[in-house]
Image (cartoon, helix red, strand yellow):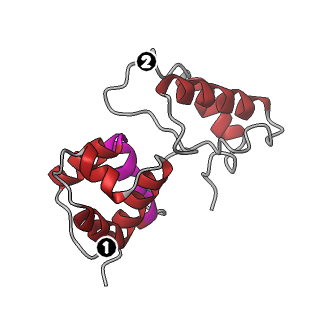
Amino acid sequence: MDPLPQVIGQVLRDARRARGLTLRDVAVRSKRRFKPSAVGGYERGERGISLERFCDLTAALGVPADRLLSQILSRVTPHGRREPSVDLTQPNQSEDAKARDVAENAHIVKARRNDDLTDVSARRAGESSATVTMPRSMLNEGMRASPSFFGLEG
């Protein structure tokens, strides 16, 4: 059985619940484009969803489609996505000053984005350097100093 529909459904359900929305709320927010039964089918992995409908549904949820797609891909192929990440739930756990600096900067980026749904943050396509202010050299130094802090070991 293909795990992709189940993972898509889990991510959609998590996003809906994080926003405190019911299936009926989604129907109303989507101007009835999505019936509660259809959304429930997507969430249970019983129905496939096209990319166009996925994007429309994420808009009704009030979450950028790229954020949810990234979560889906990370769950489906976690070992194939070796992008550096910062665990923002424990930024002060690292004893390395460079790693702490990177974590603090990542919190600033999340605050600028009003991003409170996830503990993972990455630069988005088309995002201006004014939003992501962390110099690449700072990130590289932090990754070299504390690879496990950035999820790069294993």
Q: Nearer the viewer, residue 133 or 27?
A: 27
The magenta span reads 62-75
Q: Which residue is mark 1?
A: 45
In the displayed structure image, the side of residue 152 where residue 127 appears, left or right: left
Q: Position of residue 17 (x, y in %)?
A: 47, 55
In the rendered image, the residue lying farthest to the right is 95
Q: Looking at the image, which residue is at 41% across and 60% down?
A: 13
Q: Earlier in the sequence, mark 1 or mark 2?
A: 1
Q: Main secondary structure of the magenta part?
A: helix
In what quadrant of the picture does the N terminus appear? bottom left
Other-residue count near label 1 (Cα within 10 Å), few / some / many at <14 / 14–19 / ≥20: some
Q: Which residue is mark 2?
A: 129
Q: Position of residue 93 (x, y in %)?
A: 80, 42
Q: Nearer the viewer, residue 72 or 58?
A: 58
Disc 2 element: loop
- Is residue 51 something that shows in the picture? yes
Q: Does the stretch in magenta take in 45? A: no
- Distance, label 1 to label 2, CA atoms, is 37 Å
Q: Which residue type does callout 2 highlight?
A: Ser
Which tag is nearer the camera, tag 1 or tag 2? 1
